[in-house]
Image: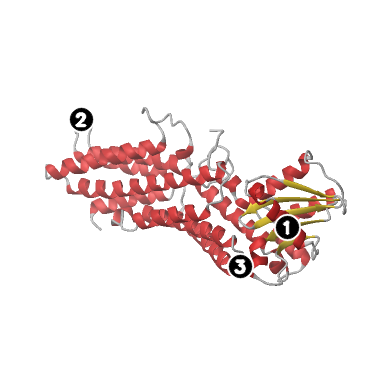
Amino acid sequence: MESEDEFLHIYFTHVSQLCYEKAKEHIEKEKEPKGCTTPWGVFLNYLQQLTLTEKSYMEIGFLQNKHKAFFRKDNSLRSVYETMKNDLKKLEDNTKQSAGDIRVQKGSKNIVQFLNARINLIDLYEKIYNMGVNKQIRYNEILTHIESVIEKNSEGFTDIGLTPVKAVFSLECEILEQLFKALTQLQTLEFLPPLALIHGAHTRLAAWESKMQSREIWKLGIFKNSPFPALFQWLQKLKGAVLSKFSLYFHDILAQQTTPHDMRQLCSKLYNDHYQKIVSFQRKYDAAYVILLSEKRIASNSGHDGIIVSHPHRVSPQTDLILKMITETSNDLQIIDKIIYKFITQEQSTYILTIIEPTIYLIILFESKKSEKDTYISNFILDLCQNLRCTKVFTSLKNTNK
């Protein structure tokens, strides 16, 4: 490895391990005497700025409104990356024209490619956040965006000096890809593919964590007790939310593999124990049943009752009546978070319906009349549905306390 490659490799190893003070010290040792301005000296100054910018990126600084450390008109982190990218491009062009420092040309070119990749990811996270804010369930769109980011940057910043950050960038993209693929496949109620994808995300998170083993212990706003940066914690949270959703959708299959006691213990360790929340709600409010129903499963599988999960277990709902209600209220049900109350006078029963995601519905039956003004019922429904859609995790990308 040539000396300039080794210098950059050590620097980007520190950055990838979150050792920002070591990265700054590494650059300081290389700096030229004061008053001596060379392309290499200018290049080192950009590396110092990149150190601070990368730290802010890992703190999810790209979704915050103000970054007082950078005295610029548009001081968003995306703008900082854009400005640095343009400045390094100029530095690369100037050294080419003057047949100047080859190491500056080569280093600038590769770092510009890295900065482009960072900007691509910032745009992706903004799209994920906005999907949560707008209560949309377009996992396929996000998945297409992730695959585009991976493809665009597959040939970028492959120089040996940048291999540490290339490895972490690839892990970050692959974790997102695996989890959004899992969310897409959960919509069609496939069992093995999302299970494998969630496991794939888990192993990649573990691989990334192992690269942080020599990290500095630093405190990040609300994450005061964790040595991991906010972005890594958010990805862990997303994995936890997807696993929790999988565990509810396939609760009956998973329950057959163990004892009821062990199943409860395992579910209690999930990011969201959806099934226990359903059990607690049903008991407290004396609901006849709470079910998740797949309209598509009924249509595609003759004789299937369409039940994904139910409590009490093995209930026999009037599926035909429920499907008729879904058809009659289809326009209203397509509105996310719209809760439909249907009181059947003959039965003196109230059916409550809402959509979780396309063709998957939450239905609650009470053998009495229930009011739409009952906030406990509506809060339970909204909380369960928003957690199953993962929109709460998407909107948590933005730390409004910062």
Q: Amino acid at mark 3?
A: Phe
Q: Residue at x 37, y 55 (%)?
A: 166
Q: Which badge, 1 or 3, is on the more N-terminal residue? A: 3
Mark 1 residue crowding within 10 angstroms, few (<14) / some (14–19) / many (20+): few
- Give the camera-side residue of 258 and 212: 258
Q: Which type of secondary structure does the marked residue at label 2 adopt?
A: loop
**For residue 301, above or below residue 170:** below
Q: Residue at x 79, y 63 (%)?
A: 313
Q: Amino acid at mark 2?
A: Gly
Examine the rendering and report whether any part of residue 210 can be seen. no
Examine the rendering and report whether any part of residue 375 can be seen. yes
- Give the camera-side residue of 155 and 281: 281
Q: Circle 2 sits on which residue?
A: 35
Q: Residue at x 41, y 37 (%)?
A: 77
Image location of residue 30, percent across then percent down: 27, 42
Image-based side of 106 in relation to 342, left or right: left
The answer to which quarter of the image holds residue 76 is top left
The disc at residue 191 is: 3
**For residue 365, above or below residue 378:** below
Q: Amino acid at mark 1?
A: Lys
In the picture, the quarter occupied by the N terminus is: bottom left
Q: Which badge, 1 or 2, is on the more N-terminal residue? A: 2
Real-space Cα separation, disc 2 to disc 3, in angstroms: 65 Å
